[in-house]
Image (cartoon, rainbow, N blue to C red):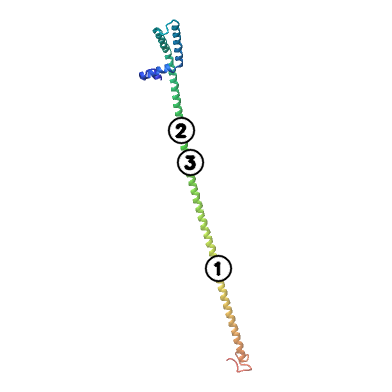
Amino acid sequence: MYSNALGLNGAGGRDAAMAAFRDYNPGYRYAVDQATDQAARKAAALGMAASGNTLAAISDRAGHMADQNYGSWMDRLNGQQGLGMQAQQQIGQYAGQQAGIAQQTGSTLGSLASSWGQNAASLQSNLGSQIGGWQNQLGRDTNASWMQRGTTLGALQAQNASAIANNYQMGAQATAAGAQNMFGAGMGLLGSGLKFATGGNLFGGGSTGTGGLY
């Protein structure tokens, strides 16, 4: 509207500014109405209410009022324009601050995401290392357990074999002793029979019978 009032937007803009000044300026409209009513009442009192001079006087009074108030109206428009420019500047500053905050927020979030990724990778690496260590230790423990079982089983089998060997040896010794005892018993019986047959002297002549063995 200030640009229209200055004529920067051509005749159409100037007419729009003048219409706004006349129709939407309460102070101007009130002053014109008061001045024209006063002029009309004065002319009516003189009996000249509808004369051309009266109408011209009213038009001049209105034009003079417009000239006096148009400049102050433009000053108010200029002040309003300054407020608008100040508001736009403040909005721009606020937008700049918001952009700075957004940039800082993005940088902070990026740093947090990077730190989180590094921490997660470190945790995964440590967990993998610990699991590997546990599995290695489990393998060692399992191997040692099987070795211990093998050693124990081998010892048990050796003891069992030794016991079996001892049993066989004792059986053989018992068999040999039994055979020896049977041989001795047989020889005893044979000797007794011969003594009986030779009359009690196995190798020489006796008092009865046919004499000795030889």
Q: CA distance from mark 3 to mark 1?
A: 64 Å
Q: Amino acid at mark 3?
A: Trp
Residue 196 in sight here:
yes
Q: Residue at x 50, y 53 (%)?
A: 135
Q: For residue 158, which quarter of the picture? A: bottom right
Residue 210 picture location, percent across and down: 60, 94
Q: Amino acid at mark 1?
A: Asn
Depth check: give the residue in front, 86 or 163.
86
Residue 20 picture location, percent across and down: 42, 18
- Mark 1 or mark 2: which is in front? 2
Image-based side of 153 in relation to 12, left or right? right
Q: For residue 213, which quarter of the picture? A: bottom right
Q: Where is mark 3, residue-wise?
A: 116
- Mark 3 or mark 1: which is in front? 3
Q: Is residue 53 above or below residue 188?
A: above
Depth check: give the residue in front, 210 or 182.
182
Give the SS element for disc 1: helix
- Mark 3 or mark 2: which is in front? 2
Q: CA distance from mark 3 to mark 2?
A: 20 Å
| Total numbered circles | 3
Give the SS element for disc 2: helix
Q: For residue 178, which quarter of the picture? A: bottom right
Q: Which mark is residue 160?
A: 1
Q: Where is mark 2, residue-wise?
A: 102
